[in-house]
Image (tube, rainbow, N blue to C red):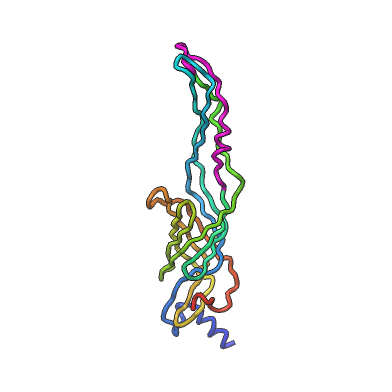
Amino acid sequence: MKSFWLLLVCVLPSMCFAQTTVKYTLSGTYITELSGAETTYSWSKIFGGCTDGRGPETATGGDSKRYPVAYYGTLTFNGTTGLSAKLTTSVFDQSKSNATVPKPTWSYDPVGNCVATFSNNGYAVFDPLTVVSATGSYSINATGTGTLKLSLGGGVVVYFQTTGSFASCASGGTIYVVPNTIMLEAIDPKTPNAIGELGVAEHANQVMMGCPPSFQ
């Protein structure tokens, strides 16, 4: 019983007097969701079918609308600086959306010019939910905050803050703390310094037996 309590004390960074350094690290798989940002999607189609004194005329129908962007899935960290992701999201289908624009009805105005009338503007079509894979890198500092980058959409940058502790272990004079929760703020790649998606990642709580080799 005595040895059990000694072990318990030594996995608590604030009470383990034999250790001098506490280092936050990300290791294993986290279940995550990012949502909140919106993207504008546009669709259109060009039609002919009318001739007036100026010759053949065309008309373009279509529209645009903002839709929220969301991802959910997993982030897997290797304990050093690398990560991989498998995320499920919806994908805008440009060609199917363009095809929803109906053919216009043509008429002539009082001076004989073609006039196109559309019964509606069509609508956005999204493909079935799709799993996308990505790789990336991350860095984490002594306070448990950091940055991760993913190879999505030209490179997504996410700032994060860790909370709680899933596990701790001691190796070579350092206590390694694996956070339980990561609060995420994705930076919109199209607008510098503008926050896009917000999200959270929770550790999948795989069993850790001692310090993983990457910590040593």
Q: 59 or 130: nearer the eye?
A: 59
36 relative to 79, above or below:
above
Q: Count the labels in the image.
A: 0
55 relative to 197, above or below:
above
81 relative to 10, above or below:
above
Q: Is residue 5 magenta?
A: no
Q: Residue furthest top?
A: 110
Q: Where residue 204 sits: x, y (%)?
A: 58, 65
Q: Residue furthest front?
A: 55
Instruction: Identify the residue at horizontal 45%, vertical 79% (top origin).
Output: 174
Instruction: Identify the residue at horizontal 45%, vertical 63% (top origin).
Output: 161
Instruction: Identify the residue at horizontal 47%, vertical 18% (top origin).
Output: 55
Instruction: Identify the residue at horizontal 58%, vertical 77% (top origin).
Output: 209
> On the rendered structure, is 57 left or right of 31?
left
Q: Where residue 143 sits: x, y (%)?
A: 41, 69
Q: 1 or 195: nearer the eye?
A: 195
Q: Mainly helix, strand or loop, the magenta region?
A: loop
- The quarter of the rendered structure image containing the N terminus is bottom right
Q: 135 or 199: nearer the eye?
A: 135
Q: Where residue 5 sits: x, y (%)?
A: 55, 84
| Magenta stretch, residue numbers | 90-114
